[in-house]
Image (tube, rainbow, N blue to C red):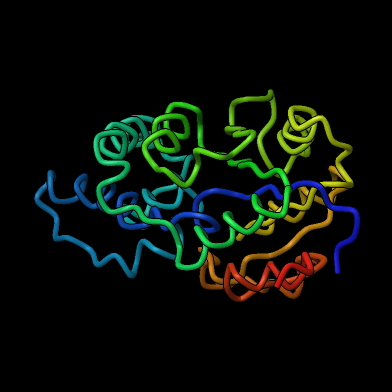
Amino acid sequence: MFNNIAAVLFDLDGTLIDSAPDLGAAADKMRTDRGLESLPLALYRPMAGAGARGMIAIAFGLTPDDASFADLKEEFFRNYESRMTENTSVFDGVAELIAQISQAGLKWGVVTNKSARFTIPLTKAMPLFNTAQTIISGDTTPHAKPHPAPLLEAARQLDLAPERCIYVGDDERDVVAGRAAGMPTVAAAYGYLGKTADTGGWKADATIAKPSALLNLLRMA
């Protein structure tokens, strides 16, 4: 389906890795530290893609507009920083997908809204990312997704025109950013979609239900 593609760029959480167990645990510790009952991971998982905002919303029902949010966010960050890779894993099929992408001579990389504070140690700790040619964090450029700047920076680092890269992500903002950057986009329907997500309305160029399905779009299967 995609022609003249030289690189594949991916979102991180919910697309390449399942970080929900550690994100949820970091938020849940805030509850138990306050004597509140623990909540099941199933409640946290759909909102894992929203980071601190999503986790604090589940744990305490608060939004960034609440006066206590900033302090809670930093507490969440500290909790998460201490356990980023305890129960985080690569989604089934992702390692094989990356291996085939590399074997085909395509470049690949990561563009995430996760700040470098977390992205750098996390990706260094996981062997999957040893072959990534670019890793762009949420604070690498002045703007985060859905702004196209992070994706354009990734293309620049790969020395490729944006239209020769495709972007794969599990959130509508990933598709918005990819389209704004002039890249073909793929919605990862297996990720952290939340309760109301409708990938059909995102206007992605394609949607995949599992990582290996990307190979068909790249005509590598």
91, above or below 113, in the image = below
Nearest the viewer among 27 and 189 is: 189
Residue drawn 42% across the image and 58% down it: 18
Residue drawn 83% across the image and 56% down it: 184
Q: Position of residue 162 (x, y in %)?
A: 86, 41
143, above or below 181, in the image = above
Nearest the viewer among 33 and 152 is: 152
Residue drawn 23% across the image and 52% down it: 28
Q: Quadrant of residue 181?
A: top right
Q: Quadrant of residue 76?
A: top left
Quarter of the image containing the N terminus?
Answer: bottom right
Q: Position of residue 142 (x, y in %)?
A: 69, 23
Quarter of the image containing the C terminus?
Answer: bottom right
Q: How many numbered markers are drawn?
A: 0
Residue drawn 59% across the image and 41% down it: 112
Q: Quadrant of residue 202?
A: bottom right
Nearest the viewer among 144 and 58 is: 144
Q: Position of residue 131 (x, y in %)?
A: 56, 40
- Outermost residue toward the left? 35
Q: Position of residue 164 (x, y in %)?
A: 86, 47
Task: Determine whether, in the image, residue 9 is placed left or right of residue 25.
Answer: right
